[in-house]
């Protein structure tokens, strides 16, 4: 079974589309899906556009129509943990849709999508990566170092870090210091983005393992829009470098899905 690869925006997609061999494009749901091989692995690549509905739609098509046996999101995110810098990479061990839940007088109580505490309560908050896959991913990256970011992108002070932890997804681009602090404090989130939680929700529904790889283009505070524009192209390449390193680990998981 092929591995489904999703990016949200052209700056993320371009790094991968130029690497695909034997590309065959198909259009569905206003989206181009490209089947091909990446480093010898069968993949289907799609640019979803931004946001959870777009990434859910594309994940559904990858799982249902293309029969993908694993789905990976590769792209950029805003950093939430003050210990992280632009260029560092976060791999989700859990994703939470931080903007889903119960709206009360004093704000939003984040809750599992599709549930309301007093209607259909759930003990689950967010979606966890398959633990076996995660262990193999950690192992595969143990001795992997990313090329340092260029000086122009603020690199050079230390090598880019690779961290595993909670990634938050919501349908807002975050450009706010107060919310950044709140999200880090409330969930211990390492990074914030706009698609991963929906990819995980759909993949889990199909019983397909998933992974979210995010290189930090900005720190989601008051400078985030300027940093994003300055760094997105360069850091998106780091996410792709990690994805390529992980393809041999992902492939056996994708083959586990029965055909048909
Ligand atoms: N993706 C990259 N930067 C982001 C931010 N600050 N908020 C949401 N998604 C992002």
Image (cartoon, rainbow, N blue to C red):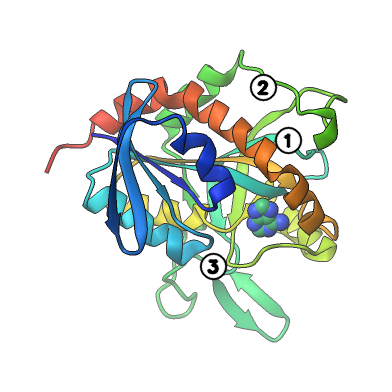
Does the residue tagged 3 have its C-beta within 8 Å of any atom of ligand 1?
no
Return the residue found at the far top.
143
Mark drawn on residue 172: none
Question: How far apart are the two marked residues, 3 and 1, measured between alpha carbons?
Answer: 30 Å
* Residue where numbered disc 3 is placed: 111
* Residue where numbered disc 1 is placed: 87
Q: Secondary structure at mark 2?
A: loop
Does the residue tagged 2 have its C-beta within 8 Å of any atom of ligand 1?
no
- Which mark is in front, 3 or 2? 2
Precedes in sequence: disc 3 or disc 2: 3
Tell me where residue 170 appears, x and y as whole percent. Answer: 59, 63
Question: How far apart are the two marked residues, 3 and 2, measured between alpha carbons?
Answer: 35 Å
Does the residue tagged 1 have its C-beta within 8 Å of any atom of ligand 1?
no
Q: Determine the residue positioned at 53% across, 60% down.
A: 50
* Residue where numbered disc 2 is placed: 146
Q: Determine the residue positioned at 54% across, 70% down.
A: 100
Q: Determine the residue positioned at 23% across, 34% down.
A: 1
In terms of depth relative to the viewer, which is nearer, 102 or 159?
159
- Residue 253, compared with residue 186, is above or below; it is above
Q: Do the CB atoms of the residues marked 2 and 1 lie less than 8 Å apart?
A: yes
Q: Secondary structure at mark 1?
A: loop
Name the side, left or right, on which 126 lies relative to 228. left
- Residue 1, compared with residue 191, is above or below; it is above
Precedes in sequence: disc 3 or disc 1: 1
């Amino acid at each position: 079974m092929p591995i489904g690869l999703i990016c949200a925006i052209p700056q993320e997609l371009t790094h991968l589309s130029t690497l695909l061999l034997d590309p065959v494009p198909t259009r569905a749901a206003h989206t181009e899906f490209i089947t091909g091989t990446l480093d010898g692995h069968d993949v289907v690549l799609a640019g979803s556009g931004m946001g959870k509905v777009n990434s859910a739609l594309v994940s559904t098509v990858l799982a249902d129509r293309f029969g993908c046996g694993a789905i990976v999101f590769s792209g950029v995110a805003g950093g939430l943990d003050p210990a992280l810098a632009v260029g560092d990479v976060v791999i989700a061990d859990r994703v939470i849709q931080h903007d889903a839940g119960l709206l009360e007088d004093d704000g939003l109580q984040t809750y599992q999508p599709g549930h309301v505490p007093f209607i259909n309560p759930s003990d689950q908050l967010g979606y966890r990566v398959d633990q076996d896959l995660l262990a193999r991913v950690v192992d595969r990256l143990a001795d992997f170092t990313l090329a340092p970011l260029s000086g122009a992108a603020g690199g050079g002070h230390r090598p880019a870090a690779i961290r595993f932890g909670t990634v938050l997804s919501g349908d807002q681009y975050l450009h706010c210091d107060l919310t950044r602090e709140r999200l880090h404090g409330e969930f211990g989130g390492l990074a914030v983005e706009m698609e991963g939680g929906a990819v995980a929700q759909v993949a889990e529904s199909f019983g397909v393992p998933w992974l979210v790889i995010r290189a930090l283009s900005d720190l989601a505070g008051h400078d985030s829009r300027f940093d994003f524009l300055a760094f997105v192209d360069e850091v998106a390449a780091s996410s792709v470098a990690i994805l390529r390193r992980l393809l041999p680990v992902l492939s056996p998981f994708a083959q586990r899905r029965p055909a048909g």
